[in-house]
């Protein structure tokens, strides 16, 4: 089984080590440590890596850490999140049009 250090896993996912420790603190990740004293470095296995991949994807989709921690995001929640994303896209497209309109009439465009 492949094991990863916190540095390796943070570099792979483009996260800070602090963010990964935060996910651990929130109970989203449970890397292994020395069972005797608990002070050795964190060691992440393939399951931890897959879980972190899911966390990154779900946060990019706009889900909260609380929703992710609950573990059962329903199809309805995905549909609601999709609607929110599409609404954001529509607002951005409107802003783009307004900016283009301004630039085309300002003489600087």
Image (cartoon, rainbow, N blue to C red):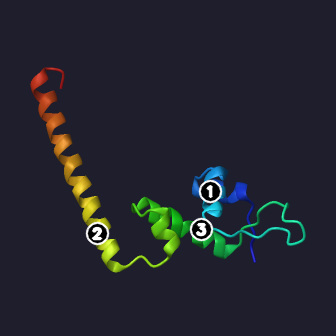
- Please report the residue visible at 24 percent of the width from the left and 60 percent of the height from the top: 86
Crowd around label 2: few <14 · some 14–19 · many ≥20 (10 Å): few
Seen as rendered, the residue at the extreme right is 36
Disc 1: which residue: 22
Which residue appears farthest toward the left when viewing the image?
Answer: 105
Residue that carries the numbered disc 3 in the rendered image: 28
State which quarter of the image contains the N terminus: bottom right
Query: Which type of secondary structure does the marked residue at label 3 adopt?
Result: loop
Q: Residue at x 62, y 50 (%)?
A: 16
- Quarter of the image that includes the C terminus: top left
SS class, disc 2: helix
Point out the tag, 3 or 1, that comes first from the N-terminus. 1
Give coordinates of residue 65: x percent, y percent.
49, 63
74 over 10 or under it: above or below: below
User: What kind of element bears circle 1?
Assistant: helix
Task: Identify the mark nearer the N-term, 1 or 2.
Answer: 1
User: What is the x, y in percent for residue 21?
Assistant: 66, 57
Mark sitting earlier along the chain (2/3): 3
Give me the disc on residue 9. none
Q: Which residue is mark 2?
A: 80
Q: CA distance from mark 2 to mark 3?
A: 23 Å
Between 79 and 22, the one nearer to me in the picture: 22
Percent across and percent down for residue 82 are: 29, 66
Left or right? Give the position of 36 relative to 27: right
Identified at 60% across, 63% down, the residue is: 26
- Label 3: how many residues lie within 10 Å, few (<14), some (14-19) or many (20+)? many
Residue found 52% across the figure and 70% down from its top? 69
């Amino acid at each position: 089984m492949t094991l990863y250090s916190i540095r390796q896993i943070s570099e792979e996912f483009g996260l800070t080590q602090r963010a990964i420790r935060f996910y651990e603190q929130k109970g989203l990740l449970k890397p292994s440590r020395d069972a005797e004293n608990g002070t050795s470095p964190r060691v992440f296995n393939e399951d931890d890596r897959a879980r972190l991949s899911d966390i990154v994807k779900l946060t990019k989709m706009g889900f909260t850490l609380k929703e992710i921690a609950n573990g059962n995001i329903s199809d309805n929640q995905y549909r609601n999140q999709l609607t929110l994303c599409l609404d954001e896209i529509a607002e951005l497209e409107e802003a783009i049009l307004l900016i283009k309109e301004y630039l085309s009439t300002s003489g600087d465009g």
